[in-house]
Image: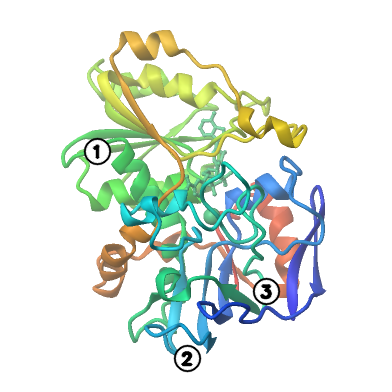
Amino acid sequence: MKAVVYEGPRQVNVERVPDARVERPTDVLVRVTTSNICGSDLHMYEGRTDFEAGRVLGHENLGEVIEIGSAVDRVRVGDMVCIPFNIACGSCGNCEKGLTAYCLTTNPEPGMAGAAYGFADLGPYSGGQAELLRVPYGDFNCLVLPEDAKERQNDYVMLSDILPTGWHATRLARMEAGDSVVIYGAGPVGLMAAYSAVLRSAGKVMIVDRHPDRLAKAEEIGAIPIDDSQVSPVDQVMELTQGLGADCGCECVGFQAHDPQGHEHPNMTLNDLVRSVKFTGTIGVVGVFVPSDPGSPDDLYKLGEIAFDYGMFWFKGQTMGNGQCNVKSYNRQLCTLIHEGRARPSWVVSQELNLDEAPDGYEHFDRRDHGWTKVVIHP
Ligand code: NAD
Ligand code: ZN
């Protein structure tokens, strides 16, 4: 099969690799019809991780079931399915509680929890930027889609990651109806956090970035754009909230946070959040903090060690929630919102490419070129 293969920092190729196949009785084999490029793929693409050359990328996948293992009895051949990026067993202590991002079964590394397709440190699983994808524990890990799935793939594929992740950011931030919320980052994830805040009836949604095209997307759904290359985002949020600060905030940037001049400041968004969220306010962090130098495998437990203004955070009595999204726990409700026409997350899509064009898509998306907001690949 053809697949997008990681070769080294900022180098991916479309190559022939052995076909994905049913390996275990609980596996489902999917012919991938849509797979997105994600900001998380850039951690591997940019060489920030120890992702091995030769591995296939892609964790935001949707497609048609073409084969099932002998122990699969819910999912059927011909079903259109969206596949949460978390690979979970469905029956360990964490999965039982809905914490599928922290599955205790699927990551073979001792002491680790959680797995994903085509991802560093999250198990050996191959990604879906390919013609075929093996889905372990297929009955649990496939969301069977409604009858309009084929025509609305660009909406439903967002259920694999960024829509639930944006939703999760607002939940971690304990956002309630009527709250004011500030979101740092207007990449695909930040845009979905803003979208989720709107869907969840936020009173005021403010979003910080410096890319005019991304801020314009946010404006389309009624968020207030704040361009931090022009103004101080903290001052701006204070002004928009009568000097109190936002009720809550979301971090949707992660370790690659930069100042508008392009210098890396991994702690910048956390510090700005602490300053622009009110006393006793709540912060949800979904941005990923991975080290710029992967170092030795032993450093895994220092993953993304950074400093931020804990004193101010403490003084303001704020609360922070963080981590990967447990996609599965939000999927059914969000799927219904799409099916019933109440959510149309495909509004974020800027390019649709075929598999051969994927390397070009990576290059543009990595540079955050104007107009490259969310790239969808149709293998
Ligand atoms: P992205 O890189 O396209 O978007 C990040 C945006 O942040 C960019 O538009 C950039 O201009 C902006 N930015 C940079 N520095 C900033 C600053 N100081 N203030 C405000 N904005 C700033 O990526 P994305 O796809 O939107 O993903 C964002 C993050 O979310 C990544 O770290 C990704 O790995 C993470 N993520 C987490 C989960 C999860 O489950 N927790 C899931 C998916 C993605
Ligand atoms: Zn993703």
For label 1, being within 8 Å of ligand 1 is answered: no
Residue drawn at x 81%, y 61% as measured from the top left: 54
* Percent of width and height locating residue 88: 47, 60
On screen, residue 212 versus residue 201, left or right, reads right
On screen, residue 292 versus residue 84, left or right, reads right
Front disc: 1 or 3? 3
Residue designated by label 2: 77
Residue type for callout 3: Ala
The alpha-carbon separation of the residues under discs 1 and 3 comes to: 37 Å
Residue type for callout 1: Met
Ranked by sequence position, the earlier of labels 1 and 3 is 3
* Percent of width and height locating residue 130: 67, 74
Residue designated by label 1: 175
The alpha-carbon separation of the residues under discs 1 and 2 comes to: 40 Å
Give the label on residue 130, or none: 3
Ranked by sequence position, the earlier of labels 1 and 2 is 2
